[in-house]
Amino acid sequence: MQASWMILASLFFSMMGVCVKFASAHFQTFELVFFRGLIGVIFMASICRVQGVSLRTPIPLMHVWRSVVGVTSLAAWFYAIGYLPLATAMTLNYMSSIWVAVFLVGGTLVMGRLQDATRQGPIVLTVMAGFGGVILLLRPTIEQDQLFAGIVGLLSGLIAALAYIQVAALGRLNEPEARTVFYFSLGTTVVGAVLMLVTGMSPWVWPSMLWLLPVGVLAALGQLCMTKAYSRGATLVVANLQYSGIVFGALFGLMLFGEHIPIMGWLGMALIMASGIASTILRNRALPRAPAEDH
């Protein structure tokens, strides 16, 4: 079930990406960030009300940290997209799964739990294999004058890994997923609003403004499913299944925008799917969660 939540989250995020592609012709980046967050706040507040979940939380600082790292990662990724080829920026951001494995297994080794770290080894290999599939599909490149943007893109993946680990930590404390997504959406709204004061707003033209609604709703649904996956599932397995978003994105590009997928791309998608299946099969042989997650 946890695998299904992550795959569903990847599908929602990919559908959101399609809507962002259409909306970006009419709105600036930080406008999209703001309205994505604002619509998410309204949507998640409604879900909390229906589910009877209070917006008052006993661990506000954990939500602040989750919002800070999440929005920082998002801003770094948008910067990388602006100065790097899209495939390169996406590849660097999707390194978050590799960083999750580094943090959890490395932390377990630092704690002196060598045997526990060894038990996570096969799943770590599937994460690395999945990332190999991402490289085959996207075939990233970087020029010498893009080094700084490349570092920022690398940091976007690293910081995203911290955000995902924080989401898992919130789940271990039984924090409702809807409330977690609400506070992240609130943080996104605040940052987007501040940056819009600098960049200004685009003129609203009907019906292009309608693209903002699915961007916000799909982002909220994706965040909700992703939060459920990290809260309830084995963190390394969920991190590996996150690569499925690349597959959905490539297929949407093929069907909606006529983008070509070469043989290497199809091989990459096959490797991503195989690594996801393998990690799901292997999860029962590994620890449900790395000891480092408790810290």
Image (cartoon, rainbow, N blue to C red):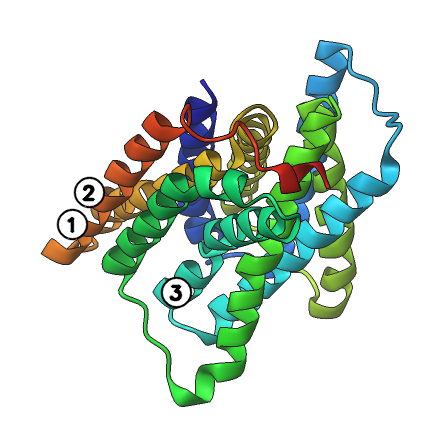
- Tag 3: residue type? Leu
- Residue pictured at 42% horizontal, 59% vertical: 90
Task: Please tell me whether mark 2 sits on a helix, a strand or a loop.
Answer: helix
Disc 2 marks which residue?
270
Location of the N terminus by quadrant is top left
Residue type beneath disc 2: Ala
> Viewer-proximal residue, 79 or 283?
283
Residue 39 in view, yes or no: no
Residue 90 circle label: none
Q: CA distance from mark 3 to mark 2?
A: 21 Å
**Above/below status of 173 relative to 80:** above
- Rounded to the nearest angstrom, the CA distance separating label 1 from label 2 is 5 Å
Residue 267: numbered disc: 1
Q: Pick whichever, 66 or 254, lies toward us.
A: 66
Instruction: Give the quadrant of the C terminus.
Output: top right
Q: Residue at x 47, y 35 (%)?
A: 238
Residue linked to disc 3? 86
Q: Of callouts 3 and 2, which one flags the residue occurring earlier in the amino acid sequence? A: 3
Location of residue 140 in the rendering, given as x and y in whole percent from the top left corner: 32, 68
The reply to whether discs 1 and 3 touch (Cβ–Cβ < 8 Å) is no
From the viewer's perspective, is 46 left or right of 16?
right
